[in-house]
Image: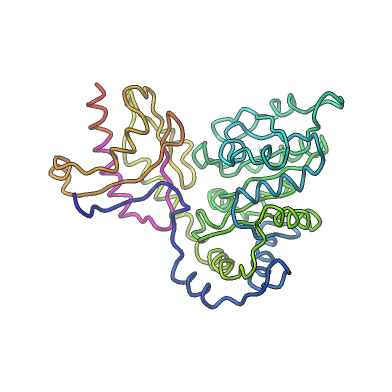
């Protein structure tokens, strides 16, 4: 069908800057940020540091660079190792940068379905004082957890992890790409989620709808180290206030509406009944923020790739049955999972249209698979 309605649920990185952001970007007062002379960047860093409860913050181009720079600032000696979840973004989706660039080894810890790393698993992986071994130098957590479907770490768990890190005299870094979604879900100031974290990385280019950028926050001396690493990695931006201005707008206008994305995610997840379906299911307990993950149980008969490809098509029979032409964009995130992400550019009407489409496609594919 020509010109179908497109509901794009691939990622919250797809958002376009709002009109208010674009105006702020046009009017931004700028300077050379490498010389710390961009007033808009300086203000964004000040506001974010205060928001996250840290002494200082640094604006970086991407979350991947932010995490890598943080690891490099923490692990500044040869022969060091970090503890990180085996389903974490740092371990799976940042090209192994901590090894490739930073020469830091990772020991992957089993990730629970809610994103936690069990204390006993961490304890088992703490290296002894033995010159045959690398030195355990850093613990990394992720909140919300991407692969687990946007799950939120409980505050008491993060506090427990912080006590573990302090006992073993290692810092705790939080990959908080979507930490504002976590704070929204818990109904708490974001700094309360990070009290026991030494450092944190937060993205403004995901659920916060900015076109570019992330921030790393922590103690002032640590942020100075991160600024040196940022330069080494090619992340020193000059008149970056043009994009930082969007971040200041986002904190005032997008953060207060994140609950709408969470509500739309619930609307999507609960709109298609998968109870008893032999091929596809969804764990509704993990649908907490702006992500919903479809689990496929027999990928030889029905795979996430087949599912996502079919969602992109509108057949004549489908149009006759539904009287709507809708395509839904999702991505497979593993051999057995597909993910939908809600964001500022998808409203409740889009979700309702997507629900009708997804329900129809699942019924069709399950019939073909022999259900």
Q: Indicate the colouring scheme.
A: rainbow
Q: What's the residue at 57%, 36% (across, down)?
A: 92
Is 131 displayed left or right of 307 in the figure? right
**In the image, residue 38 lies at what x, y percent?**
67, 72
Q: Main secondary structure of the magenta part?
A: helix
Residue 73 falls inside the magenta stretch: no
Image x and y of residue 19, in percent:
44, 71
- Quadrant of the rendered structure where residue 76 is? top right
Instruction: Residue 9: give x, y in percent of width and height.
Output: 39, 48
**In this rendering, would 303 be left or right of 367?**
right
Residue at 56% over, 48% down: 182
- Rendered view: 42 above or below 101: below
> In the image, is 247 to the left or to the right of 13?
right
Nearer to me, 312 or 174: 312
In the image, is 2 to the left or to the right of 303? left
- Magenta stretch: includes residue 357: yes
Q: Is residue 133 above or below residue 173?
A: above
Return the x and y of residue 131 as percentages of the image width and height: 87, 26
Q: Total marks drawn?
A: 0
- Name the residue rendered at 47%, 60% in the picture: 257
- Name the foreground residue: 236 vs 339: 236
Read off the magenta span.
339-361
In the depicted view, which residue is nearer to us: 260 or 227? 227
- Name the quadrant of the C terminus: top left
């Amino acid at each position: 069908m020509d010109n179908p309605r497109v509901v794009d649920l691939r990622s919250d990185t797809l958002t376009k800057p709002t009109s208010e952001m674009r105006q702020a970007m046009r009017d931004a007062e700028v300077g050379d940020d490498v010389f710390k002379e961009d007033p808009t960047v300086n203000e964004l860093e000040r506001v974010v540091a205060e928001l996250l409860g840290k002494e200082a913050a640094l604006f970086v181009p991407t979350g991947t660079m932010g995490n890598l720079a943080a690891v490099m600032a923490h692990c500044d000696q040869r022969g060091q190792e970090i503890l990180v979840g085996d389903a974490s973004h740092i371990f799976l989706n940042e090209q192994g940068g901590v090894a490739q660039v930073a020469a830091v080894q990772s020991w992957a810890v089993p990730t629970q379905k809610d994103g936690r790393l069990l204390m006993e698993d961490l304890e088992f992986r703490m290296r002894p004082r033995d010159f045959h071994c690398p030195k355990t130098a850093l613990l990394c957590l992720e909140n919300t957890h991407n692969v687990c479907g946007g799950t939120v770490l409980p505050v008491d768990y993060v506090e427990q992890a912080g006590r573990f890190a302090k006992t073993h005299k290692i810092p705790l870094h939080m990959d908080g790409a979507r930490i504002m979604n976590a704070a929204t879900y818990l109904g708490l100031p974001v700094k309360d989620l990070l009290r026991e974290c030494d450092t944190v990385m937060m993205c403004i280019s995901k659920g916060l709808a900015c076109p570019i950028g992330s921030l790393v926050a922590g103690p002032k001396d640590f942020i100075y180290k991160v600024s040196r690493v940022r330069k080494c990695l090619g992340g020193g931006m000059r008149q970056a206030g043009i994009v930082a201005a969007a971040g200041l707008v986002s904190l005032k206008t997008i953060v207060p509406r994140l609950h709408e994305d969470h509500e739309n995610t619930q609307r999507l997840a609960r709109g298609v009944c998968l109870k008893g379906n032999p091929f596809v299911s969804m764990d509704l307990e993990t649908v907490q923020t702006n992500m919903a993950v479809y689990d496929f149980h027999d990928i030889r008969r029905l795979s996430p790739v087949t599912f996502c490809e079919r969602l992109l098509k509108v057949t004549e029979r489908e149009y006759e049955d539904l009287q709507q032409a809708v395509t839904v964009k999702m991505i497979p995130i593993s051999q057995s999972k597909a993910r939908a992400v809600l964001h500022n550019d998808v409203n409740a009407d889009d979700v309702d249209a997507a629900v009708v489409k997804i329900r129809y496609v699942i019924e069709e594919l399950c019939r073909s698979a022999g259900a």
